[in-house]
Each structure stands twice: as structure tokens, then as C-alpha cells.
Amino acid sequence: MTYQEQALALSTSYGLGQQGISIKPIGNGHINTTLLLQSPSSSLVVQKLNTSVFPDIPNLVNNARLIEKHLTEKKQNAEYELSVIKHVATAEHNYYLTLNGENWRALEFIGGSYSQDVVENKQQARIAASAFGQFAKALDDFDAKQLVDVIPNFHNLAMRFNMFDDVIERNPCQRVVECAAEIEFCQSVRPLVNEVAKLEPKLPLRACHNDTKINNMLFCNKQDTAKAVIDLDTCMPGYWMYDFGDMVRTFCSPEEEDSTALDKVTVREEIFEAIVQGYVEPLKEVLTEAEKESFWLGAKVMCFMIGLRFLTDHLDGDNYFTIHHKNHNLERARNQFALYRELIRKETRLKQILFAA
């Protein structure tokens, strides 16, 4: 099936007709393929879902629709200001479809917006962190147990180390020797597992976004305010410390996560402070003391764990994350480990900022 044939088939399924149909890639996601499907009168975001990462498509879609329903009700009651990303049903009233053996779904296109891959200034950081804080606050009264773990153990550091250990033992691509320095570094950080094990039982279970990257928040074109929190695929039961930590991971460095300019990878203190201010303010009435204390551990874990995952995938032959060139996942891992080292180097000052909020 050619690209245009695919576009026409999707257009038919979603009632856009057959005339003047176009389709083009948008976004920079690692997992799903995201495209903008347009007719002369309508636009939809369509996604080809990665069933290797998300094998349970019905529950993936159901999770997201439960979240969108709750947020929509909050918005109708003036308790949530942001736009809500919504699924679009096919002509047969289904919220996902199979096309040529591939799984697809459609989402409403939120116009008048843009996304960022790298935070440029503290104002952007605070706006985005506030959006994720508002998202979390709106879900404070949502029963997280309604959600299915579509990626079990997604933020389970102990499990990620088990996968890491297994791939080192198997060494399927004979890459262990060339990654000796990175492997040794990971082994030195293993005590983080015990820190997590001690803290998690003290935290309330929340409905979490679980992927609070800067490019999962849309800015409004006209006012540079927050428009919408997007990409609800990883919304699962979890802990706010990981959502906070992933913002630190993806907001604070001036370099993208696959940059090889490791000397430029750092934690910008003013951005960290903006994250703290933006995220904590909407949550101040519901945030527990244990959760506030957990944010520093969340920052450490997320900066390290994604690097561990990138390295594990590299050692295993690049089966999970989409790569664009040889050693792409290894470069990503080195980048994240550099960020973790910077986080630890600046620990005293960053903790002062966090606990002063």
C-alpha cells in the first residue's frame, strides 16, 4: 500500500472523503508513527501504533479515553483550563482500526499550537511544568486503579536493571566490550534501586502521565501560553516523582537527548527552578510531604533510567527505540549519563531550590 493509498483508506474510515487528501509526518516520537491527515475541510492526527511496545491496543485506547472523559468533565466545570486531546471514532464507531495489518487511531487536531523539543528559556519551562501540574491536579480525584498498565513496570528501575543484566549476559550483538565504560557507570549507580524501594511505599498511587517531555505539551501560537498536554499513551498508575523527574530530564539540558556535544549537556539551574515553581503551584493543596521529598529521587532516577534503557536497547540490537543511524541509542545513553552526572554535581544547590518551594 503506497503512502497515498494509505491516506485515502484512512480518510475513508474517518469520513474525510477522497478529494484533496494529504498526509505528512508530524512530531518526533520514538515509538508511534504520527501523521497529519488533511482534507480541504478537516484535519486529523492519525497514529500507527507500535504493537511491539503497546501490544494491548484496546486498553491503550481505553486508558486514554478514560483520562480524556475525566478532563473534559473538569473543563466543563471550569476546573481545567487546557484543551483536551480527544479520540475520533471511525464511521463504524470504533476508536481504533486495522489497516493492512497495522493498528491505527485518530485524534482531534489541536490547531493554533506548536511544540518544543528543547526548552529555550525559564518562561517556557514554567509554562510547561504548570501545564503538567494542572494535568496532575485535574486527575487528583481520578481513581488510578481504573487504568491498565499497558507497559508493566514502565518506571521500575529494578526491572530495568534485570533487563540490563540479562542482555549483558546474552551479548546478542557482541557490543558489551565496546560499552565497558558505560556498563561500569551503570553498575556504580545501582544503589538507586534501594532508595526507590524504601520511598515508593510512602507515596500515594496517582494517575500519572509518565512521559512529561517538553514536546508532549503544546504551546498556544498567539500568547505563548499552555494549550494542551498530549500523548496520553503512557497514562498509568504511578507516582508524581517520575513525572517531575522526567521534566527535569527533558527540560534542563540545553542539548537534545541524542546530542553528542556532551560538554554542553548540563542542568540549567534557572530551568530547574522554573520546573519546581510551575509544577508545585497547581498541586500545593494536594501534594503530600512525602511526594515533595520524592521529587529529588525522581529527578535522579529518570535522568539515569532512560540512559540505562537506551544502553540496554543498544546492547540488544536496537529493538525498542527508533534509531536513525548506527550507535544512535549509545549516543543517547551517553547523553543521559552526562546529564545525571551534572545533576549530582549540582545536587546541593538544586535541592535548596526544590525544598524552598
Image (cartoon, rainbow, N blue to C red):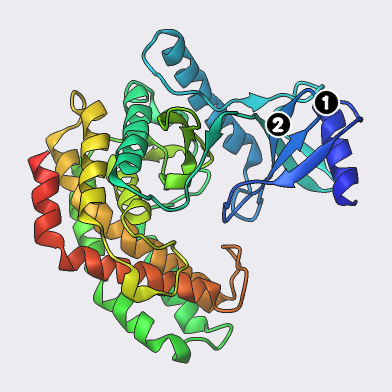
**Image: 233 above or below 303:** above
Q: Which residue is drawn at 36% across and 35% down?
A: 132
Question: Which of the two residues, 224 or 171, is positioned nearer the viewer here?
Answer: 224
Q: Nearer the viewer, residue 54 or 48?
A: 48
Q: Which residue lies furthest to the bottom in this view?
A: 177
Residue 26 in the image: x percent, y percent? 64, 46
N-terminal of the pair, mark 2 or mark 1, is: 1
Q: Tell me what residue is drawn at x 78 percent, y 42 percent.
A: 23
Q: Is residue 276 left or right of residue 333?
A: left
**Image location (x, y in percent) of residue 324:** 62, 69
Q: Residue at (43%, 85%) from the top-left corner?
A: 179
Q: What residue type is labelled 2?
A: Leu
**Where is residue 219 drawn, in percent x and y?**
46, 34
Q: Residue at x 46, y 9 (%)?
A: 76
Relative to 53, residue 191 above or below = below
> Disc 2 versus disc 1: distance between alpha carbons?
9 Å
Look at the image and tell me in which quarter the C terminus lies. top left
Residue 301 - label: none
The image position of residue 22, as x and y in percent, is: 82, 39
Instruction: Specify the amino acid type for callout 1.
Output: Leu
| Residue closer to the observer: 312 or 335 | 335
Q: Residue 164 vs residue 300: left or right? A: right
Is residue 211 among the parts visible in the rendering?
no
Name the element at disc 1.
loop
Residue of label 2: 44
